[in-house]
Image (cartoon, grey):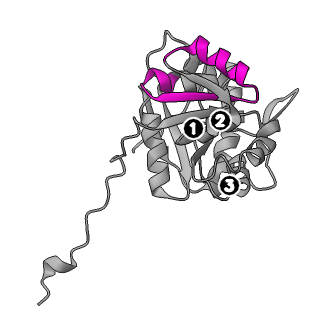
Amino acid sequence: MTTSADTTKPAAKDPWDLPDVSGLVVGVLGGTGDQGRGLAYRLAKAGQRVIIGSRAAERAEAAAAELGLGVEGADNAECARRSDIVIVAVPWEGHGKTLEALREELAGKLVIDCVNPLGFDKQGAYALKPEEGSAAQQAAALLPESRVTAAFHHLSAVLLSDPEIDEIDTDVMVLGEKRADTDLVQALAARIPGMRGVFAGRLRNAHQVESLVANLISVNRRYKAHAGLRVTDV
């Protein structure tokens, strides 16, 4: 006999009930650049095990030694192999070639693309639109065996790298195809004091998130600031 209790729907999952990512190894491709280096510093400071990747292992090792906090350095391939989560923070110009060369090493990995395709002219920064639609969609096309997400686009490298700043007051827009993956990225963002990861849609919506960086650059130049984002009412 069926009772009313048998047909009760399970309670909806709390969107802020996020997994524990403290034991995962995070690799940062492009970790010797300003953005990658800043992210590596903040995550390592929060207790995450971090490996910096670069085309040259010696350059990565030198950057890791400067950061301390247990950060390691390796060439991009070794960084990808040894990491559970890999943040892509390489320059847009080398984005496609870098990922294409690491397809095997990144297979099965959770990949977080934070690259912003931008151009610059006398009027300032402006968004570029890749053939695939966005940098994140290009990553997904080049890495069919990886779990590609997009996040960490709107962070100031200056604030990330400043040891005098204890908290980064910003939200991180997180995009991806599977909730389990975006939950992991949100949880990783939340490891950094002051930061919060907010789900912002599937990868098809990544272009406008990447493009918004051009607007933030304009804000920062006008107001001499390091502007970030906050999402209200969530």
For the question of whether residue 227 can be seen, the reply is no
Q: Which of marks 3 and 2 is nearer the N terminus?
A: 2
The amino acid type, in three-letter code, at marker 2 is Glu
Residue beneath disc 2: 78
Looking at the image, is mark 3 or mark 1 nearer the viewer?
1
Q: Which residue lies furthest to the top in this view?
A: 164
Query: In the drawing, does residue 194 fall left or right of residue 140?
Result: left
Rendered image: mark on residue 132: none
Q: Position of residue 59 (x, y in %)?
A: 72, 19
Residue 44 drawn in magenta:
yes
Q: How far apart are marks 1 and 2 (CA)?
A: 6 Å
Decide whether residue 223 is among the magenta residues: no
Which residue is label 1 attached to?
82
Q: Do labels 1 and 2 touch, CB within 8 Å?
A: yes
Q: Which of pointers 3 and 2 indicates the residue nearer the eye? A: 2
Which label's residue is closer to the chain start, 3 or 1? 1
Task: Using the image, determine if residue 188 lies above or below residue 177.
Answer: above
Judged left or right of residue 153, residue 57 is: right
At horizontal 72% and vertical 45% (from top left) the residue drawn is 102
Disc 2 crowd rating (10 Å Cα; few below 14, some 14-19, many 20+) is some
Q: Foreground residue, 177 or 86?
A: 86
According to the image, label 3 marks what residue? 140
Q: What stretch is highlighted in magenta?
A: 42-69
Name the secondary structure under disc 3.
Answer: helix
Nearer to us in this view, 52 or 74: 74
Q: Which amino acid does label 3 sit on?
A: Ala
